Image: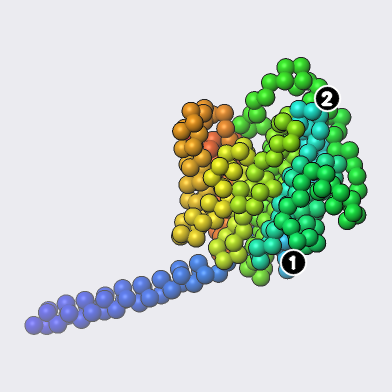
Amino acid sequence: MQSRRKFIKTAAISSVALSLESFIGEPAKSYAKSIPNKPLVISTWKNGIAANDAAWKILSSGGRALDAVESGVRINEANPEDQSVGYGGRPDRDGVVTLDACIMDENSNIGAVAFLENIKHPISVARAVMEKTPHVILVGKGAFDFAIENGFEYQNLLTEKSKEQWYEWLKKSDYKPKANIENHDTIGMLALDSSGNLSGACTTSGLAYKMHGRVGDSPIIGAGLFVDNEIGAASATGHGEEVIRIAGSHTVVELMRQGRSPLESCEEAVKRIVKSLNKRGKNIADYQVAFIAVNKNGEYGAFAIQKGFNYAIYSNHGNNLSDSKYLI
């Protein structure tokens, strides 16, 4: 009898202990998830490191995510050594540097410019479109005229380095964009500020030696960039035509809305692009598309078609460059 009582007592104590362990453990885990990792900024490619530094100065002092992403990508737009964005960007096949950019804040305010010439900071013109016009996108001469009217300066964006490379390209005029090149074709940036608000920016000089007039995904809200302040934000880089086909960044955010993590959402979007390429009989190895994403809790992820894509992430743990996961 004594042995039976001892067994029941021991079992009861063990049961209570397990219940307490479950009670203590689970709420703590849930509580940790409810505390956003903020502020935070994530951007595409290794040139995002310098851009993140500028964005972090604003975020770390309690500034707004919108101001952070604009200031961040302006660093790349002004850098002539970054031949994929702004000043120093590689020209189209006619020798003209044309720029695309868009910006989006936590209230779904959006602005964009496309096929813009001779203005160094298209991202700031895009913000002016957002804040000063009833429209969401201006293109070509209309975008240029608007920029000049609002105090932006005319500047020849074709540097000697890019001009020499264009002359070299003209010898064969062989248009086969490389899947991964030294200086890449976009910088996309997403930020979560101390108030828990999200914003994003995307800016590019587009694919080198493209047809004059070509516009990719970068200035298109829902393709190159999308922000939903209730859920998360995403941005794309790579072959813009493929991103447009699946409304890539919007797709990533909608997948996060369905409960997937940022990484899982980016991976699924990449798989949809690969499925589209396969349907059309394209050689997957010739294409690179990658997505970055962040949700309201500051969880982030990135995924690419193939090896070679990296992204920069700045949080309270510092500014770090990471290699993305990839499909092939």
**As displayed, is residue 282 above or below residue 230?**
above
Circle 2 packing at 10 Å, graded few (<14), some (14-19), many (20+), is few
Q: How many marks?
A: 2
Residue pictured at 48% horizontal, 42% vertical: 272
The amino acid on which the numbered mark 1 sits, given as a three-letter code, is: Gly
Question: Which residue is denoted by mark 1 in the rendering?
Answer: 63
Q: Which of the 4 quarters of the picture holds residue 186? A: top right
The first of marks 1 and 2 along the sequence is 1
Three-letter code, disc 2: Glu
Check disc 2 and report the residue beneath it. 164
Percent of width and height locating residue 56: 73, 58
What x and y, as percent, mark residue 9?
20, 81
The residue nearer to you, when weighing 315 against 47, is: 47
Q: Is residue 47 left or right of residue 263?
A: right
Camera-side residue of 160 and 299: 160
Crowd tier of the residue under label 1, counting other residues whose Cα lies within 10 Å: few below 14, some 14–19, many 20 or above: some
Q: Residue at x 51, y 56 (%)?
A: 254
